[in-house]
Image: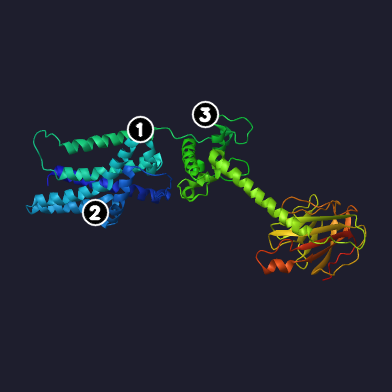
Amino acid sequence: MPRRSWILWSTALLLTLIPDVFFWIRSLLVGDDGGRSYAWMWVGSCLGNQINDLIGYPERLIRVLPLFWFGGAPMIVVACACCYLSVRTGRARLGRIIARSGAVTLLFFRLPELLLFTLDGALGPRCLEAWGPSAILSWNAGMDLYFLAPPILVLLAVRPARRGYVRRGRFARTAVAALTLMTTFLVVDRAAPPGKVSSEGELDCAGFGGGTVHDLTKAEKDFLCQVRGYAPFMNNGIEIWDKAPDRVVLTQGRDLCRLAGQHGGEINAPAVRAAPHAALAGALGSLCPAVARAQELAGRRQQEEEDAYVAKEEKACAAHPAHRPKIKPVRQHRATTWTEFWTINGWEDGYEDASPDLVKELIGSERGALAIWAADEVGYACVTTESYTRRPPLETKGWKEVVEVAYESPTGSLTLGDGLGNTSPKLTTSGPGSYRVRVHLRGRERVYQVPYPPDGAVELLIMVFPGKRKEPAVYR
């Protein structure tokens, strides 16, 4: 082979090896082999991306062959050897066929993606979303351009020498024009400034009026605040989207709004939940009127259902006969209480962190804190509280469990509260000091027997009165 061909073969081989050698050396020096994983979301795709998906599978099947490792370096070595041997044996044409076949295969790995990417770019910016963010798209396109060089050099290496200028065919001119267009588009895309990611202060998420973003509506700014995790009562933003540019987040939010609007504003509709940008649905109420209306309607329905449920429980508790004290209490109060954590609790100021252990799984006390079992984790209980200035007579008839414990009141302001924020009247009527708390219970076995116990199943009678005794007493 002529010296020119050897130079072209060597250059082609060197170009295929440079990236792998670079990342190998880099991994030895800084521990980074260049491997990266990315994820992005998009809605739909255009013709170019669809064709690329179709040819992607057979391409991956071929690429795993050892001949195409290291950018195709083994293929170039084999093709060069075949070309050299064919020249030595007088069958140069066969060597050129083998070399060109290998080069065309390497071109197949890179050229279609470049042309299809250029096609989608010509169809509009929205068609490029399926190809990934601009940084990833530019990197992939740049590497595709780079790896076009080795097979082109191979084709030049096996091209017979010609004298004089030969006008290139229409196909060659078209390919050069397409590659030039694609390269120009890539440079322009890479040179475009990154999208703006507004900060919490710029968006005025706290509502203090000091924001500097004036080209967005309040709804758009509220939506961005929620997505980025700046809104009140939000600890974290929506992963991936919280770092995306404002324009991208708003575009995807509006698109999801249109999709939700087609389903009555329901963000839990199957089509909305299956959308690639469905993670934005939780913040969509501030941006999308249809979703806001649906959420408002759902909130009213839920409140009506909760009110009806509470009314039913209160009716069931009211149907129980009122307790008739043996001696007159200072106060008697009946209530329907709700708990989500087994107990109803009472804390005096400064003792909110106390967590008393229960005696007989019914009542527990510490200085300034009281806990009384009321449900099998979640549920309502019918509660009667009575406050006395002296010890009331013991009552066990009709009650399944009766337990009494000591309670030390540091401030004399003990009240019981439930999971809905309702509180009882003050129970420690004699001010700070030592008390006894006697709890009567019936209905515990009913809530353990069935998953959904009848309304008003649990009844509690709680008596609080002064007393010096410290030991707990189990009467039943």
Most foreground residue, 5 or 339: 339
Q: Residue at x 38, y 33 (%)?
A: 191
The answer for how far apart the CA atoms under marks 2 and 1 are is 35 Å
Front-most of 435 and 49? 49
Above or below, comparing residue 405 to residue 351 in the picture: below
Residue position for label 1: 188
Residue beneath label 2, please? 74
Query: Mark 2 vs mark 1: which is more N-terminal?
Result: 2
* Disc 2 versus disc 1: nearer the observer: 1
Q: Label 1 near label 2: C-beta < 8 Å?
A: no
Tag 3 near tag 2, CB within 8 Å: no
Which x, y percent locates residue 411?
85, 51
Q: Residues within 10 Å of mark 3 (few under 14, many from 20)?
A: few
Would you name the residue on which mark 3 appears?
215
Q: Amino acid at mark 3?
A: Asp
Q: Residues within 10 Å of mark 1 (few under 14, many from 20)?
A: few
Secondary structure, mark 2, is: helix
Looking at numbered disc 1 in the image, what kind of residue is underneath it? Val
Q: Is any atom of residue 305 visible in this view?
A: yes
Asked whether, in this view, residue 99 is left or right of residue 302, the answer is: left
